[in-house]
Amino acid sequence: MLLKLSEIFISLLIINPKEGVLQNITGSSFTKNKYSDSHVILAYNNVGPLMCVSDCMMYKECNAVNFNRQNLECELLTVSYPGDNISDMNGSSYTEIGGWKMDRDICTPNPCEVGQKCIRARDNHPFCLKFDAPCDVNPCYNNGVCRNKVKYRCICPDGYSGDHCERE
Protein backbone atom coordinates (compact mmCIF):
# COMPACT_ATOMS: atom_id res chain seq x y z
CA MET A 1 0.00 0.00 0.00
CA LEU A 2 2.80 2.41 0.90
CA LEU A 3 4.50 1.64 -2.42
CA LYS A 4 1.36 2.46 -4.40
CA LEU A 5 0.83 5.77 -2.53
CA SER A 6 4.43 6.84 -3.05
CA GLU A 7 4.20 5.97 -6.76
CA ILE A 8 1.01 8.02 -7.14
CA PHE A 9 2.56 10.98 -5.32
CA ILE A 10 5.77 10.88 -7.34
CA SER A 11 3.80 10.34 -10.55
CA LEU A 12 1.80 13.49 -9.88
CA LEU A 13 5.04 15.43 -9.54
CA ILE A 14 7.02 14.14 -12.49
CA ILE A 15 4.77 12.80 -15.26
CA ASN A 16 3.79 15.28 -17.90
CA PRO A 17 0.00 14.95 -18.20
CA LYS A 18 0.07 16.27 -21.78
CA GLU A 19 2.23 13.34 -22.87
CA GLY A 20 -0.02 10.75 -21.24
CA VAL A 21 1.16 7.57 -19.58
CA LEU A 22 -0.57 4.87 -21.61
CA GLN A 23 1.70 2.76 -23.76
CA ASN A 24 0.70 0.51 -26.64
CA ILE A 25 1.52 -3.10 -25.66
CA THR A 26 1.45 -5.78 -28.34
CA GLY A 27 3.01 -9.06 -29.27
CA SER A 28 2.64 -12.15 -27.18
CA SER A 29 -0.28 -13.68 -25.30
CA PHE A 30 -1.13 -15.30 -21.98
CA THR A 31 -1.33 -19.06 -21.48
CA LYS A 32 -4.67 -19.63 -19.76
CA ASN A 33 -5.06 -21.77 -16.64
CA LYS A 34 -1.29 -21.82 -16.00
CA TYR A 35 0.63 -20.55 -12.97
CA SER A 36 4.36 -20.21 -12.31
CA ASP A 37 5.76 -20.85 -8.82
CA SER A 38 8.66 -18.48 -9.54
CA HIS A 39 9.97 -15.75 -7.22
CA VAL A 40 7.34 -13.00 -6.94
CA ILE A 41 8.97 -9.56 -7.04
CA LEU A 42 5.76 -7.72 -6.29
CA ALA A 43 2.05 -8.50 -6.32
CA TYR A 44 -1.01 -6.27 -6.33
CA ASN A 45 -4.61 -6.32 -7.48
CA ASN A 46 -7.19 -4.28 -9.39
CA VAL A 47 -5.27 -4.13 -12.68
CA GLY A 48 -5.82 -5.64 -16.09
CA PRO A 49 -3.54 -8.11 -17.86
CA LEU A 50 -1.85 -5.58 -20.16
CA MET A 51 -1.15 -3.22 -17.26
CA CYS A 52 0.44 -6.20 -15.50
CA VAL A 53 2.71 -6.78 -18.53
CA SER A 54 3.48 -3.06 -18.80
CA ASP A 55 4.44 -2.89 -15.11
CA CYS A 56 6.70 -5.92 -15.48
CA MET A 57 8.61 -4.09 -18.21
CA MET A 58 9.30 -1.25 -15.76
CA TYR A 59 11.01 -3.55 -13.21
CA LYS A 60 14.53 -4.56 -14.24
CA GLU A 61 14.46 -8.16 -12.94
CA CYS A 62 10.89 -8.95 -14.03
CA ASN A 63 10.70 -11.44 -16.91
CA ALA A 64 7.21 -12.98 -16.54
CA VAL A 65 3.81 -12.46 -14.90
CA ASN A 66 1.01 -14.47 -13.37
CA PHE A 67 -2.39 -12.84 -13.78
CA ASN A 68 -5.55 -13.99 -11.99
CA ARG A 69 -8.53 -12.72 -13.96
CA GLN A 70 -11.10 -13.43 -11.22
CA ASN A 71 -9.30 -11.24 -8.64
CA LEU A 72 -7.59 -8.95 -11.18
CA GLU A 73 -4.37 -9.87 -9.36
CA CYS A 74 -0.94 -9.38 -10.91
CA GLU A 75 2.29 -11.09 -9.83
CA LEU A 76 5.54 -9.74 -11.29
CA LEU A 77 7.98 -12.65 -11.51
CA THR A 78 11.65 -13.47 -11.80
CA VAL A 79 11.61 -16.83 -13.58
CA SER A 80 14.73 -18.99 -13.56
CA TYR A 81 15.05 -22.41 -15.11
CA PRO A 82 15.58 -25.11 -14.02
CA GLY A 83 13.82 -25.02 -10.70
CA ASP A 84 10.71 -22.96 -11.35
CA ASN A 85 7.62 -24.86 -12.40
CA ILE A 86 4.53 -23.99 -14.39
CA SER A 87 1.42 -25.82 -13.27
CA ASP A 88 -2.29 -25.93 -14.02
CA MET A 89 -4.43 -23.45 -12.08
CA ASN A 90 -7.95 -22.45 -13.04
CA GLY A 91 -8.44 -18.71 -13.37
CA SER A 92 -4.74 -17.92 -13.62
CA SER A 93 -2.81 -16.96 -16.75
CA TYR A 94 0.94 -16.87 -17.33
CA THR A 95 3.16 -15.10 -19.83
CA GLU A 96 6.86 -14.43 -20.30
CA ILE A 97 7.77 -10.86 -21.17
CA GLY A 98 10.22 -11.64 -23.99
CA GLY A 99 7.51 -11.78 -26.67
CA TRP A 100 5.79 -8.54 -25.67
CA LYS A 101 6.60 -5.15 -27.19
CA MET A 102 5.89 -1.67 -25.86
CA ASP A 103 6.04 1.65 -27.67
CA ARG A 104 9.57 2.97 -27.23
CA ASP A 105 9.98 5.68 -24.62
CA ILE A 106 12.52 6.79 -22.04
CA CYS A 107 11.90 3.65 -19.91
CA THR A 108 12.18 1.22 -22.84
CA PRO A 109 14.60 -0.47 -22.54
CA ASN A 110 14.61 -0.14 -18.77
CA PRO A 111 17.64 1.91 -17.58
CA CYS A 112 17.12 1.27 -13.84
CA GLU A 113 18.96 -1.03 -11.46
CA VAL A 114 17.53 -4.20 -9.94
CA GLY A 115 15.19 -3.21 -7.09
CA GLN A 116 14.02 -0.07 -8.88
CA LYS A 117 11.05 0.79 -11.07
CA CYS A 118 11.39 3.16 -14.04
CA ILE A 119 8.97 6.08 -14.09
CA ARG A 120 8.70 8.46 -17.04
CA ALA A 121 9.68 11.96 -15.90
CA ARG A 122 8.35 15.27 -17.14
CA ASP A 123 11.68 16.35 -18.59
CA ASN A 124 11.91 13.17 -20.72
CA HIS A 125 14.37 11.53 -18.35
CA PRO A 126 13.86 8.24 -16.52
CA PHE A 127 13.26 8.40 -12.78
CA CYS A 128 14.31 5.20 -10.97
CA LEU A 129 12.20 4.62 -7.87
CA LYS A 130 13.40 2.10 -5.28
CA PHE A 131 10.64 -0.25 -4.18
CA ASP A 132 10.22 -2.53 -1.18
CA ALA A 133 8.37 -5.83 -1.44
CA PRO A 134 6.64 -7.37 1.59
CA CYS A 135 9.23 -10.16 1.88
CA ASP A 136 12.15 -7.71 1.96
CA VAL A 137 11.74 -7.46 5.75
CA ASN A 138 11.80 -11.27 6.10
CA PRO A 139 8.63 -11.73 8.22
CA CYS A 140 8.88 -15.56 8.41
CA TYR A 141 10.43 -17.30 11.43
CA ASN A 142 12.20 -20.65 11.81
CA ASN A 143 13.63 -20.67 8.27
CA GLY A 144 10.21 -20.18 6.69
CA VAL A 145 10.27 -19.01 3.08
CA CYS A 146 8.46 -15.78 2.33
CA ARG A 147 6.46 -15.53 -0.90
CA ASN A 148 5.36 -12.07 -2.04
CA LYS A 149 1.65 -11.95 -2.75
CA VAL A 150 -0.77 -9.02 -2.54
CA LYS A 151 0.31 -9.22 1.12
CA TYR A 152 2.73 -12.15 1.59
CA ARG A 153 2.66 -15.82 2.56
CA CYS A 154 5.14 -17.81 4.64
CA ILE A 155 5.88 -21.36 3.55
CA CYS A 156 6.79 -23.14 6.77
CA PRO A 157 9.33 -25.96 7.14
CA ASP A 158 8.17 -29.28 8.57
CA GLY A 159 7.22 -28.99 12.22
CA TYR A 160 6.21 -25.29 12.10
CA SER A 161 2.94 -23.53 11.37
CA GLY A 162 1.22 -20.16 11.68
CA ASP A 163 1.10 -17.06 9.53
CA HIS A 164 4.81 -16.45 10.23
CA CYS A 165 5.89 -20.08 11.00
CA GLU A 166 5.97 -19.08 14.65
CA ARG A 167 4.30 -22.21 16.11
CA GLU A 168 5.91 -25.62 16.63
Image: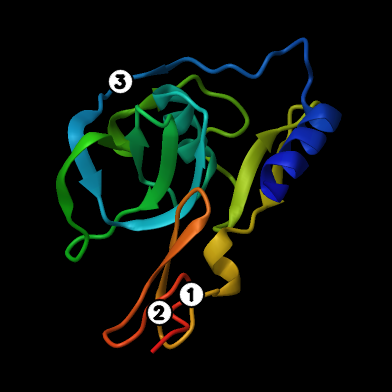
- Closer to the chain start, of discs 1 and 3, is 3
**Rendered image: mark on residue 164:** 1
Residue 96, x across and y down, in percent = 28, 39
Q: Label 2, on which residue?
A: 144
As helix, strand or loop, the secondary structure at mark 2 comes to loop
Residue 98 relative to residue 88: left or right: right
Whether the residues at callouts 1 and 3 have beta carbons within 8 Å, the answer is no
Q: Assess disc 3: are there few (<14), some (14-19) or many (≥20) residues with their C-alpha within 10 Å of its C-alpha.
A: few
Discs 2/3, front: 2
Which quadrant of the structure image shows residue 157? bottom left
Alpha carbon of mark 1 to alpha carbon of mark 3: how far? 40 Å
Looking at the rendered image, the disc whose residue lies closer to the viewer, 1 or 3, is: 1
Across and down, in percent, residue 126 comes to: 69, 38
Q: Secondary structure at mark 3?
A: loop
Quarter where residue 143 is shown: bottom left
Direction right: furthest residue: 13
Kindly check if marks 1 and 2 are in contact, taking CB atoms under 8 A apart as contact.
Answer: yes
Instruction: Kindly identify the amino acid type of the residue bearing the numbered disc 3.
Output: Gly
Residue at mark 1 to residue at mark 2: CA–CA distance: 7 Å
Name the spot of residue 41 as percent of width and height, x first: 47, 54
Q: Quadrant of the C terminus?
A: bottom left
Counting every numbered tag in the picture gives: 3
Q: Report the Cα–Cα distance between label 2 and label 3.
A: 38 Å
Inspect this view and state whether residue 133 appears.
yes
Neighbor class of circle 1 (other Cα within 10 Å; few <14, some 14-19, many 20+) is many
Q: Residue at coordinates 45% horizontally, 32% vertically from top-left? A: 52
Hey, which residue is sitting farthest top in the picture?
18
Mark 1 vs mark 2: give the one in front.
1
Q: Are marks 2 and 3 in contact (CB under 8 Å)?
A: no
Front in this rendered view, residue 24 or 163: 163
Residue 27, which numbered label?
3
Q: Please, what is the three-letter code of the amino acid marked with disc 2?
A: Gly
